[in-house]
Image (cartoon, rainbow, N blue to C red):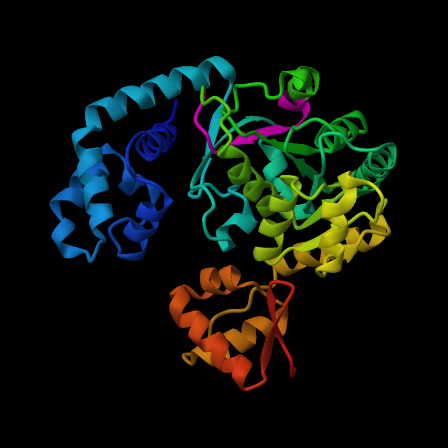
């Protein structure tokens, strides 16, 4: 196992076994105490603790660093346990330091800096070059939604677009198995460790995806399913897809979480129109009422994904010192979410938010479906 993977495992051991959560990590990054995951290993924690007076950190961050410092021997033991589990199950890590770390995640806040994966790593590169589509829905869908899921999946994989879902029963399973059966690529996000089959009824398709597709989890090996992991898993499904398709969703469906994450990330959300007399469809119908797009044909989805892929290679150079001019130059290329603008410019959220507000007040930009657009080109 490479030194790089051991660094990833130490980082994960610290994140999941101390008080260092995403808010603490954000504080460490924003104050310059951490510049990469290499700085958040046992050796890095010792250095941060030694130099902690140089940084303007919140008290909870200081307490978390102290806790991690005291736990460093146990952290190394846990990282070694993760290593054994990875070796046994053919699991590898992908971190933000890797070239194939999901491109879209670099422009979305709150994405994991290290993930665990089983299966075809090349699919991450396909997501970048050909695009990805998140397809989600209820665990007990009607025949119409299942049929539509199969048909849309077939059309998308003809264009080499990667199908992303959550390995749940129902719509998720149909999307994965259709992609695999027709020679396409698929990514399944797990609400548990990548070595755990959940739900167990999907054992057959899970095993096929580990061979012909890609299993991903932000949870370390051996982590069992708990309720709180499901929304976290859903944000990753939305984050990897260029667009999200909602095939069927009830009022209290977790599918609505995925739709909400996608919209907040500035992604397009398409909803399959369905039966107004079925409780299982009300959530999707409300999304349509609130502005989601009607899913009518695969061609529209494919065109939208192709546009997104094209834009990946068309980020303008940052030539202006004026923040308003920089942002207008970015939006002249394409609409962008707040997260994208922050990631590309490198400026702080509060600064970018202020500039965008000024531009809106001047009538130069507006927020539309989670993305800022220029009103005057």
- Vertical arrangement, residue 260 with respect to residue 163, above or below: below
**Quarter-wise, where is residue 43 in the image?**
top left
**Quarter-wise, where is residue 240 in the image?**
top right
Judged left or right of residue 301, residue 78 is left
Q: Would residue 10 be counted in the magenta stretch? A: no
Quadrant into which the C terminus falls = bottom right
The foreground one among 174 and 47 is 174
- Vertical arrangement, residue 261 with respect to residue 315, above or below: above
Quadrant into which the N terminus falls = top left
Q: Position of residue 295 (x, y in %)?
A: 81, 51
Q: Position of residue 106 (x, y in %)?
A: 49, 51
Count every numbered label the image shows and give the total.
Answer: 0
Q: Position of residue 132 (x, y in %)?
A: 68, 44
- Vertical arrangement, residue 167 with respect to residue 89, above or below: below
The foreground one among 350 and 288 is 288
Magenta-drawn segment: 209-221
**Quarter-wise, where is residue 290 in the image?**
bottom right
Q: Would residue 210 be counted in the magenta stretch? A: yes
Q: Position of residue 256 (x, y in %)?
A: 65, 45
Judged left or right of residue 38, residue 374 is right
Q: Residue at x 55, y 77 (%)?
A: 328
**Residue 347 in view here:** no
Judged left or right of residue 317, residue 251 is right
Q: Residue at x 24, y 47 (%)?
A: 61
**Residue 130 in view here:** yes
Q: Residue reaching furthest bottom?
A: 362
Q: Residue reaching furthest top?
A: 88
- Vertical arrangement, residue 2 with respect to residue 336, above or below: above
Q: Residue at x 79, y 38 (%)?
A: 153
């Amino acid at each position: 196992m490479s030194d790089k993977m051991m660094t990833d495992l130490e980082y994960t051991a610290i994140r999941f076994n101390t008080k260092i959560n995403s808010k603490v990590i954000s504080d460490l990054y924003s104050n310059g105490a951490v510049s990469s995951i290499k700085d958040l290993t046992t050796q890095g924690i010792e250095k941060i603790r030694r130099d902690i007076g140089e940084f303007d950190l919140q008290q909870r961050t200081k307490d978390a660093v102290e806790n991690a410092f005291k736990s460093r021997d146990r952290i190394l033991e846990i990282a070694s346990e993760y290593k054994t589990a990875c070796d046994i199950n053919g699991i590898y890590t992908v971190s933000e330091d890797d070239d194939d770390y999901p491109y879209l995640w670099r422009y979305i806040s709150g994405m994991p800096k290290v993930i665990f994966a089983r299966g075809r790593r090349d699919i991450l590169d396909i997501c970048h070059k050909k695009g990805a589509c998140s397809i989600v829905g209820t665990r007990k869908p009607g025949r119409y939604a299942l049929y539509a899921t199969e048909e849309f999946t077939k059309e998308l994989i003809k264009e080499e677009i990667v199908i992303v879902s959550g390995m749940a029963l129902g719509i998720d399973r149909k999307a994965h198995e259709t992609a695999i059966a027709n020679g396409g690529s698929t990514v399944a996000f797990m609400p548990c460790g990548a070595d755990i089959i959940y739900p167990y009824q999907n054992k057959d398709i899970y095993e096929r995806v580990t061979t012909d597709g890609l299993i991903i989890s932000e949870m370390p090996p051996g982590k069992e399913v708990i309720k709180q992991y499901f929304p976290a898993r859903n944000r990753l499904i939305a984050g990897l897809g260029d667009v999200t398709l909602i095939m069927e969703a009830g009022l209290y469906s977790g599918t609505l979480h995925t739709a909400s994450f996608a919209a907040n990330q500035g992604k397009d959300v398409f909803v399959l129109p369905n039966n107004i007399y079925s409780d299982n469809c009300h959530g999707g119908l409300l999304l349509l009422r609130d502005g989601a797009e009607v899913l009518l044909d695969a061609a529209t989805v494919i065109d939208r994904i192709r546009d997104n892929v094209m834009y990946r290679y068309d980020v303008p150079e940052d030539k202006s010192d004026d923040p308003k001019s920089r942002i207008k130059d970015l939006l002249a290329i394409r609409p962008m979410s707040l997260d994208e603008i922050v990631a590309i410019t490198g400026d702080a959220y509060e600064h970018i938010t202020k500039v965008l507000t000024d531009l809106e007040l001047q009538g130069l930009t507006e927020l539309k479906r989670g993305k800022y657009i220029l009103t005057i080109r």
